[in-house]
Image (spheres, coloured by chain):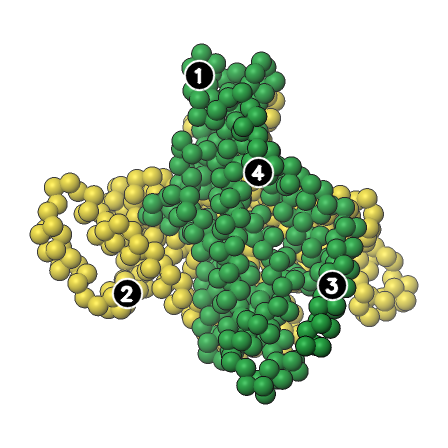
Amino acid sequence: MTTLTADQAQSHWWQSRVMRRFRSHRLALLGLCMISLLTLACVIGPYLLPYDSLYIDLRARFAPPFSGDHYLGTDPLGRDVAARLLMAGRISLLVGFSAMILATMVGTVVGVIAGYRGGWISAVLMRIVDGFLSYPSIFLLLALAAVLKPSPMMITVIIAVTGWMEVARIVEAEVRSLKEREFVLAGRMLGLSRMHIMFREILPNVTGPIIVAATLTVARAILLEAYISFLGFGIQPPLPSWGNMLNGAQQYLASAPWLAIIPGIAITIAVSSFNFIGDGLRDALDVRNDTV
Amino acid sequence: MPAFLLNRFMQSAVLLVIVSIIGFTVLNLIPGGPMSQYALDPGMTQEDMNRLAEQLGLNRPIWVQYLEWVWRLLHGDWGTSFRDGAPVLTVISRHIFATLLLMGSSTVIAIAVGTWIGIRGATHRYSIFDYTATVGAMIALSIPTFWFGLVGIYVFSLQLGWLPAGNMYTIGDGSVLNYLHHLIMPSVVLALVHIAIWSRYMRTATLDVISQEFVKTARAKGVSERRVLMKHVVGNALLPMITLAGVQLPAILTGALVTETVFTWPGMGRLFLDSLGYSDYPVVMGLLMFSAVLTIAGNLIADIVVALVDPRIRLA
């Protein structure tokens, strides 16, 4: 029991130091503010706007932004861009976030097993990681999205399929160095099961790097969803996503540039927020990492 | 060196096996699997399908099918395109030049600009320049490439009229200048993300080298700061960048696909997307495998070049 309380005390102290360092990271705070506001807008915004995202008004096609009731203008069908942007945000953020959770879970399990077991198990798992990394992610994503039914759920799964490897690599490296430590030896001498040692003793010590990698994975997932939806193989209309809002925008670039510009700004804000937060967390949690 | 080479070749061979298994799995996810071409034909009965499956050997164990598929790939038989009946490798070779041109020019831009930003960031650490470059890189990594392309077209083609909005050349004008004119915007768009990545790594690498003893020695001997930087620091900092160039290859291919789509550039990415649109699965599978093989080869070449240039790695 005494060790438990000591642990708790330690983790509280550790947390406060991390929080202090994170708070001093201005960029990360900016990212946190931006993504919170954006999420809030996407969740409650559609209820406050005068138009529904699916309401078609052919008399008000291509209305420019900041004119009348359509704050961000209308699209070729006369639908309100602001309403569509916020509904699209719900989907894009949800897909990005769910894909991150899935990818992080898979990556963590693979990384922990490969790192702890070593030997041929590790060799096989890590070569599979390398194999997936050899494919340009968008080629694999598009091929999978084209042959499987592109429901939002399926899009989430295939984005996770092409995005779990970074987490696996990071976790594998951490676990490999942690398993030589005394507490692992102590666990073995106590006769704890391998599963218990891997996931209850070692894993909690890898939380920092996993959180950082997960944050950057959200950024990546949102971008990838935008890519494949833009190319027409991701989220399918009438369901809006930031990517598929840009899908038809190129042909109206001369007459209605806002259709292309507005969703792109939303994507950039969301993705850079997560990148900023990830950078702040990396500094705060003192995670050594080679990736940008 | 031979041991190192052998080791690296073995690793690449193992990777090729893994990649082929992933590819084969994707192939079998396609509706109708390897018979997707026939499955599209409305006149096909289940009986016809069964007979075809028998002829094509699709009722044999999955591992036999896999081995045969790999055997055919190794012998250059990558299937034929549904669209024009040409062999897949021929179709790919018709589009590879455009992609290599785009990737090459954007890599040159990314290396030139990224190296400069990285070195300046390292020598003027924590300056306004350094801070701007750091934040700028993170934002550049967050901008969707296709959107950056669209904004570029809007500004430079539609508003200013300086650059063409797409295609590789103007029909009827085959001059080099015309090609270059069309190449500028797509390469800069594709380069943006890689400038960001390259400059971050270059900054770290330069900082690593600057703190080393031989740089201090050179300075102590009275070598001018400029010469120290050019001769001792940059050369050594660029070494790990060769490996990075290999690692970044899949990302560049991903960017190229998107850029080609926006700029109607007749390369492999455009071909991939068109083939998907036509459900031309042999070409899709061919490009998927080809891009992975290209990546593995690129990484292998990068490692060999580093080993040739840097004796420390050869001996290790």
Give the letter of the chain under mark 1.
Answer: A
- Amino acid type, callout 1: Asp
Q: Earlier in the sequence, mark 1 or mark 4?
A: 1
Q: CA distance from mark 2 to mark 1?
A: 54 Å
> Residue under mark 2: which chain is it in?
B
Q: Which chain is green?
A: A
Q: Mark 3 vs mark 4: which is more N-terminal?
A: 3
Q: Please tell me which residue lies in front, B102 or A63.
A: A63
Q: Earlier in the sequence, mark 3 or mark 1?
A: 3
Asked if the residues shown at circle 3 and circle 4 are in contact, with their CB atoms under 8 angstroms apart, the answer is no
Report the residue marked by disc 3: A12
Q: Is residue A263 left or right of residue B57?
A: right
Check disc 1 and report the residue beneath it.
A57
User: Residue B299 or B133: which is nearer the viewer?
Assistant: B133
Disc 2 on helix, strand or loop? Answer: helix
Residue found 58% across the figure and 55% down from its top: A214
CB of mark 2 within 8 Å of CB of mark 3? no
- Residue B101 x %, y %: 50, 45
Which residue is found at the position 49% from the left and 45% from the top?
A95
Please say if A251 is above or below B208: above
Query: Which quadrant: the N terminus of chain B?
Result: bottom right
Amino acid type at image mark 3: His
* C-alpha separation, residue under disc 1 versus residue under disc 4: 26 Å
Give me the chain that's yellow: B
Which residue in the structure is indicated by mark 4? A267
Tag 1's secondary structure? loop
Is label 4 or label 2 in front?
Answer: 4
Which amino acid is tagged 2?
Tyr
Q: Are marks 4 and 2 in contact (CB under 8 Å)?
A: no
Q: Residue at x 64, y 69 (%)?
A: A205
Task: Give the residue at the far front of this rendering.
Answer: A1
